[in-house]
Amino acid sequence: MKAVILAGGRGTRLSEETDFKPKPMSEIGGMPILWHIMQVFSFYGVKDFIILAGYMSSHIKHFFKNINIISNSVEFDLANGKTKYLGKKINWKVKVLDTGEDTLTGGRILRAKKYIGKEDFFLTYGDCISDINLNELKKFHKKHKKIATLTGITQPGRYGSLSLSGSKVKSFSEKPIDKTNFINGGFFIFQNSIFNYLKNDSTILEREPLSQLANKNSLMCFKHSGFWHPMDTLKDKRTLDDLWKNKKAPWRKLIK
């Protein structure tokens, strides 16, 4: 299966980074979050990627052109114009598609139709990292045989939760996790028939297409209770960077 990654948005809430590069190129431990996401897929045997680029797409192209130099010690034979990588080369196949700066999520996927082919495919966002078990996600999708499967995740609330008796506080929980309220965490699997629900560049995947699928009982939720974290703000970036630097990143075990 191919993995398709949405990487074309502007990321305005992370403007400290995205004024100069696309959000998926914001770094965790010296490597772009996009690289971390792809390493998770690679751990589960997915080596064929389609990157749906847009805003500042040249940064993504240059990264993959030089990825084996960036991630290895290198010997340059300047006399003969040869380069030797002194470590393990990354053996991914990566297509970086220019899908337009203002194209919306469904439109970006539609533009990649001829490259995706007729098989089922993974899709995720280029700004969220997780320790998700993709083999289990794939089994779940095949078992239910629906057009789409998304990964549902739970997140801590933004504020502390109070349990009251009248005006008395009976208990207080700092940013509790509501295990009954799932949100869309990306890490989708789609059948090829998803393209019947994508109309044009203005299609937002998360609105009409997913709503239609839900109304037709053609959308399943794979519940992931492990780690998931977006990189939406500078605070998110610092949190993820600290996890990596302190060797506490839950997805680190998936990176070979």
Image (tube, rainbow, N blue to C red):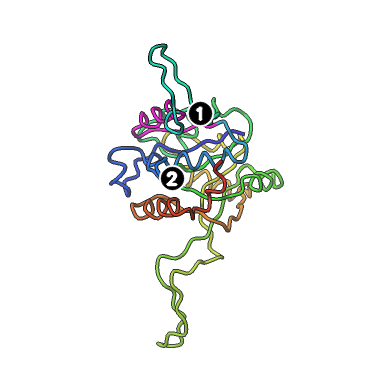
Read off the magenta span: 49-68
Q: Which residue is mark 1?
A: 94
Q: Position of residue 112 (x, y in %)?
A: 50, 29
Given the image, on which type of amino acid does mark 2 rest? Asp
Disc 1 or 2, which lies upstream in sequence? 1
> Foreground residue, 71 or 5?
71
Judge by depth and name the residue closer to the eye, 122 or 71.
71
Dot 2: element: loop
Point 49% across, 55% down: residue: 248
Q: Does the stretch in magenta take in 92?
A: no
User: Label 2 belongs to which residue?
Assistant: 127
Circle 1 sits in a helix, a strand or a loop, which is it? strand
Amino acid type shown at disc 1: Val
Q: What whole-number distance in Å separates the C-alpha atoms at marks 1 and 2?
A: 18 Å
At a point 64% along the width and 32% down the height, the residue shown is: 119
Q: Residue most toward the right?
A: 143
Q: Which mark is residue 146?
A: none
Q: Is residue 22 above or below residue 158?
A: above
Packing grade of label 2 (10 A; few <14, some 14-19, many >=20) is many
